[in-house]
Image: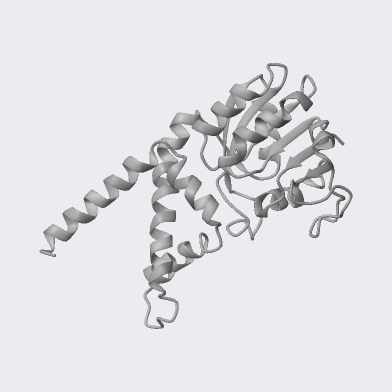
Protein backbone atom coordinates (compact mmCIF):
# COMPACT_ATOMS: atom_id res chain seq x y z
CA UNK A 1 0.00 0.00 0.00
CA UNK A 2 1.07 3.57 -0.54
CA UNK A 3 2.10 5.55 2.50
CA UNK A 4 -0.19 8.37 3.56
CA UNK A 5 1.11 11.02 5.93
CA UNK A 6 -1.39 12.82 8.13
CA UNK A 7 -0.13 16.04 9.69
CA UNK A 8 -2.38 17.04 12.58
CA UNK A 9 -4.20 14.43 14.66
CA UNK A 10 -7.06 16.36 16.16
CA UNK A 11 -10.63 15.12 15.95
CA UNK A 12 -10.81 15.18 12.16
CA UNK A 13 -7.28 13.93 11.50
CA UNK A 14 -8.01 10.98 13.76
CA UNK A 15 -11.37 10.43 12.08
CA UNK A 16 -9.93 10.22 8.57
CA UNK A 17 -7.04 8.10 9.82
CA UNK A 18 -9.55 5.52 11.01
CA UNK A 19 -11.30 5.43 7.63
CA UNK A 20 -8.12 5.45 5.54
CA UNK A 21 -6.16 2.87 7.54
CA UNK A 22 -7.50 -0.07 5.46
CA UNK A 23 -6.27 1.60 2.25
CA UNK A 24 -2.89 3.13 3.18
CA UNK A 25 0.14 2.60 5.35
CA UNK A 26 -0.44 5.53 7.71
CA UNK A 27 2.40 7.79 8.83
CA UNK A 28 1.06 10.06 11.59
CA UNK A 29 2.57 13.30 12.85
CA UNK A 30 1.29 15.80 15.37
CA UNK A 31 3.35 18.56 16.95
CA UNK A 32 1.76 17.78 20.33
CA UNK A 33 2.65 14.06 20.35
CA UNK A 34 6.13 12.60 20.71
CA UNK A 35 7.42 10.45 17.84
CA UNK A 36 7.35 6.77 18.70
CA UNK A 37 4.41 6.96 21.08
CA UNK A 38 1.28 5.12 19.90
CA UNK A 39 -1.69 7.21 18.92
CA UNK A 40 -4.31 6.65 21.66
CA UNK A 41 -7.10 5.85 19.18
CA UNK A 42 -5.42 4.57 16.04
CA UNK A 43 -2.61 2.70 17.80
CA UNK A 44 -0.08 3.64 15.11
CA UNK A 45 3.24 4.99 16.46
CA UNK A 46 3.63 8.70 15.90
CA UNK A 47 6.25 9.75 13.35
CA UNK A 48 8.53 12.73 12.84
CA UNK A 49 7.52 15.47 10.43
CA UNK A 50 10.23 14.31 8.02
CA UNK A 51 8.80 10.78 8.03
CA UNK A 52 5.24 12.00 7.40
CA UNK A 53 6.42 14.20 4.52
CA UNK A 54 8.24 11.25 2.93
CA UNK A 55 4.89 9.57 2.23
CA UNK A 56 3.55 9.50 -1.33
CA UNK A 57 0.38 11.31 -0.19
CA UNK A 58 0.37 13.97 2.55
CA UNK A 59 -2.84 15.30 4.12
CA UNK A 60 -2.67 18.52 6.14
CA UNK A 61 -5.25 18.36 8.94
CA UNK A 62 -4.34 21.42 10.99
CA UNK A 63 -6.64 24.39 11.71
CA UNK A 64 -7.07 26.86 8.86
CA UNK A 65 -5.11 29.49 10.76
CA UNK A 66 -2.00 27.26 10.76
CA UNK A 67 -2.00 26.00 7.17
CA UNK A 68 0.37 28.64 5.78
CA UNK A 69 2.94 28.01 8.53
CA UNK A 70 2.74 24.23 8.10
CA UNK A 71 3.01 24.51 4.31
CA UNK A 72 6.15 26.61 4.62
CA UNK A 73 7.63 24.15 7.12
CA UNK A 74 7.02 21.03 5.05
CA UNK A 75 7.97 22.54 1.68
CA UNK A 76 11.66 21.49 1.76
CA UNK A 77 10.73 17.98 2.97
CA UNK A 78 8.48 16.96 0.08
CA UNK A 79 9.83 14.79 -2.73
CA UNK A 80 8.93 15.41 -6.39
CA UNK A 81 5.58 13.85 -7.26
CA UNK A 82 4.16 14.00 -3.73
CA UNK A 83 0.42 14.63 -3.61
CA UNK A 84 -0.59 17.15 -0.94
CA UNK A 85 -4.16 17.69 0.21
CA UNK A 86 -5.78 19.85 2.85
CA UNK A 87 -9.17 19.36 4.52
CA UNK A 88 -9.91 22.95 5.50
CA UNK A 89 -13.50 24.18 5.86
CA UNK A 90 -12.67 27.21 3.72
CA UNK A 91 -10.72 27.11 0.50
CA UNK A 92 -9.64 30.51 -0.87
CA UNK A 93 -7.01 31.30 1.76
CA UNK A 94 -5.71 27.74 2.34
CA UNK A 95 -5.36 27.03 -1.39
CA UNK A 96 -3.53 30.32 -1.89
CA UNK A 97 -1.16 29.41 0.96
CA UNK A 98 -0.47 25.94 -0.43
CA UNK A 99 0.16 27.32 -3.91
CA UNK A 100 2.48 30.01 -2.56
CA UNK A 101 4.56 27.87 -0.18
CA UNK A 102 4.74 24.39 -1.67
CA UNK A 103 7.32 23.65 -4.39
CA UNK A 104 6.30 23.30 -8.03
CA UNK A 105 7.32 19.63 -8.05
CA UNK A 106 4.39 18.54 -5.83
CA UNK A 107 0.75 18.12 -6.85
CA UNK A 108 -1.97 19.81 -4.80
CA UNK A 109 -5.70 19.13 -4.45
CA UNK A 110 -7.80 21.21 -2.08
CA UNK A 111 -10.51 19.20 -0.34
CA UNK A 112 -13.35 19.91 2.04
CA UNK A 113 -15.24 16.92 3.44
CA UNK A 114 -18.72 18.36 3.98
CA UNK A 115 -19.16 16.38 7.17
CA UNK A 116 -17.39 15.72 10.43
CA UNK A 117 -17.06 12.91 12.96
CA UNK A 118 -20.47 13.74 14.41
CA UNK A 119 -22.43 13.80 11.16
CA UNK A 120 -20.58 10.74 9.79
CA UNK A 121 -21.38 8.43 12.70
CA UNK A 122 -23.56 6.33 10.39
CA UNK A 123 -20.77 5.87 7.83
CA UNK A 124 -19.50 7.74 4.79
CA UNK A 125 -22.08 6.52 2.28
CA UNK A 126 -23.84 9.39 0.52
CA UNK A 127 -21.91 12.16 2.26
CA UNK A 128 -20.38 14.94 0.16
CA UNK A 129 -16.83 16.14 -0.37
CA UNK A 130 -15.71 19.18 -2.37
CA UNK A 131 -12.52 19.02 -4.45
CA UNK A 132 -10.59 21.97 -5.86
CA UNK A 133 -7.90 21.44 -8.52
CA UNK A 134 -4.81 23.44 -7.56
CA UNK A 135 -1.71 21.95 -9.21
CA UNK A 136 -1.13 18.80 -11.26
CA UNK A 137 -3.57 16.32 -12.77
CA UNK A 138 -4.32 14.06 -9.80
CA UNK A 139 -7.84 15.29 -9.00
CA UNK A 140 -9.56 12.57 -11.07
CA UNK A 141 -7.65 9.88 -9.16
CA UNK A 142 -8.59 11.48 -5.83
CA UNK A 143 -12.23 11.75 -6.93
CA UNK A 144 -12.27 8.10 -8.03
CA UNK A 145 -10.86 6.92 -4.69
CA UNK A 146 -13.34 8.99 -2.66
CA UNK A 147 -16.24 7.80 -4.80
CA UNK A 148 -15.11 4.26 -4.03
CA UNK A 149 -15.53 5.07 -0.32
CA UNK A 150 -19.17 5.94 -1.01
CA UNK A 151 -18.74 9.71 -1.02
CA UNK A 152 -20.43 12.08 -3.44
CA UNK A 153 -17.73 14.25 -5.07
CA UNK A 154 -18.29 17.88 -6.08
CA UNK A 155 -15.59 19.55 -8.19
CA UNK A 156 -15.49 23.28 -7.63
CA UNK A 157 -13.21 26.31 -7.39
CA UNK A 158 -12.04 27.84 -4.10
CA UNK A 159 -14.08 30.98 -4.80
CA UNK A 160 -17.31 29.14 -5.67
CA UNK A 161 -16.83 26.90 -2.64
CA UNK A 162 -16.42 29.77 -0.20
CA UNK A 163 -19.33 31.76 -1.63
CA UNK A 164 -21.69 28.85 -1.04
CA UNK A 165 -20.20 27.73 2.26
CA UNK A 166 -20.52 31.25 3.63
CA UNK A 167 -24.23 30.41 3.84
CA UNK A 168 -24.09 26.62 4.20
CA UNK A 169 -21.64 26.69 7.11
CA UNK A 170 -21.32 30.33 8.10
CA UNK A 171 -25.01 30.80 8.81
CA UNK A 172 -25.81 27.31 10.13
CA UNK A 173 -22.92 27.36 12.60
CA UNK A 174 -23.76 30.90 13.70
CA UNK A 175 -27.43 30.03 14.24
CA UNK A 176 -26.48 26.75 15.91
CA UNK A 177 -24.18 28.48 18.38
CA UNK A 178 -26.87 31.03 19.23
CA UNK A 179 -29.48 28.32 19.80
CA UNK A 180 -27.04 26.39 22.01
CA UNK A 181 -26.54 29.53 24.09
CA UNK A 182 -30.32 29.69 24.62
CA UNK A 183 -30.11 26.31 26.45
CA UNK A 184 -33.37 24.83 25.15
CA UNK A 185 -32.58 21.17 25.82
CA UNK A 186 -35.03 20.82 28.73
CA UNK A 187 -38.09 21.75 26.66
CA UNK A 188 -40.38 18.71 26.35
CA UNK A 189 -43.37 20.20 24.51
CA UNK A 190 -41.77 20.11 21.09
CA UNK A 191 -42.85 19.85 17.48
CA UNK A 192 -41.23 17.73 14.82
CA UNK A 193 -39.75 20.83 13.18
CA UNK A 194 -38.22 21.90 16.51
CA UNK A 195 -36.80 18.41 17.01
CA UNK A 196 -35.23 18.52 13.56
CA UNK A 197 -33.78 21.94 14.33
CA UNK A 198 -32.20 20.67 17.54
CA UNK A 199 -30.86 17.64 15.69
CA UNK A 200 -29.14 19.99 13.25
CA UNK A 201 -27.76 22.04 16.16
CA UNK A 202 -26.31 18.87 17.70
CA UNK A 203 -23.94 18.53 14.74
CA UNK A 204 -22.10 21.73 15.72
CA UNK A 205 -22.31 21.24 19.49
CA UNK A 206 -18.82 19.79 19.84
CA UNK A 207 -17.06 21.89 17.21
CA UNK A 208 -14.05 23.73 18.55
CA UNK A 209 -13.96 27.51 18.90
CA UNK A 210 -11.02 27.42 16.47
CA UNK A 211 -13.17 25.79 13.79
CA UNK A 212 -16.06 28.19 14.39
CA UNK A 213 -13.69 31.16 14.14
CA UNK A 214 -12.22 29.82 10.90
CA UNK A 215 -15.66 29.36 9.34
CA UNK A 216 -16.76 32.86 10.30
CA UNK A 217 -13.53 34.83 9.82
CA UNK A 218 -11.36 33.00 7.29
CA UNK A 219 -14.04 32.76 4.60
CA UNK A 220 -13.86 36.04 2.64
CA UNK A 221 -17.59 35.86 1.84
CA UNK A 222 -18.89 35.02 5.33
CA UNK A 223 -19.29 38.62 6.44
CA UNK A 224 -21.66 39.42 3.56
CA UNK A 225 -23.68 36.27 4.29
CA UNK A 226 -24.04 37.22 7.96
CA UNK A 227 -25.04 40.76 7.05
CA UNK A 228 -27.67 39.50 4.61
CA UNK A 229 -29.10 37.31 7.38
CA UNK A 230 -29.12 40.15 9.93
CA UNK A 231 -30.77 42.47 7.39
CA UNK A 232 -33.55 39.93 6.79
CA UNK A 233 -33.96 39.45 10.54
CA UNK A 234 -34.36 43.21 10.97
CA UNK A 235 -36.89 43.31 8.14
CA UNK A 236 -38.88 40.59 9.86
CA UNK A 237 -38.68 42.43 13.21
CA UNK A 238 -39.93 45.63 11.53
CA UNK A 239 -42.76 43.67 9.91
CA UNK A 240 -43.84 42.42 13.33
CA UNK A 241 -43.54 45.91 14.80
CA UNK A 242 -40.78 44.87 17.21
| Residue depicted at 42% across the width and 61% down the height | 176
Along the horizontal axis of the image, is 219 left or right of 146?
A: left
Residue 107 location, quadrant: top right
Where in the figure is residue 26, as x and y percent of width and height?
Answer: 82, 43
Where in the figure is residue 56, as x and y percent of width and height?
Answer: 80, 30
Residue 233 position (above or below residue 147): below
Residue toward you, 112 or 69: 69
The total number of labels drawn is 0
Where in the figure is residue 228, as x and y percent of width and height?
Answer: 27, 45
Where in the figure is residue 220, as x and y percent of width and height?
Answer: 41, 36
Residue 164 location, quadrant: top left
| Residue depicted at 78% across the width and 44% down the height | 29
| Residue depicted at 48% across the width and 49% down the height | 213
Residue 124 position (above or below residue 136): below
| Residue depicted at 46% across the width and 63% down the height | 201
Colour convention of the picture: one colour
Q: Quadrant of the C terminus?
A: bottom left
Along the horizontal axis of the image, is 159 left or right of 85?
A: left
Q: Quadrant of the N terminus?
A: top right
**Which residue of the protein is positioned furthest toward the top in this rendering?**
104
Residue toward you, 170 or 52: 52
Amino acid sequence: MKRLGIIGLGAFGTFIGRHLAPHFDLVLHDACRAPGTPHPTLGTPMATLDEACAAEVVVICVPVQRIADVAAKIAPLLAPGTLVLDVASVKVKPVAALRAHLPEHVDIVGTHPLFGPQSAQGGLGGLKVSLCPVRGDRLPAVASFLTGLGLSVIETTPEAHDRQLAYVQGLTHLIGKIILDLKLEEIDQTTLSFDKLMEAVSYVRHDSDELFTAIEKENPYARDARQAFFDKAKTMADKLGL
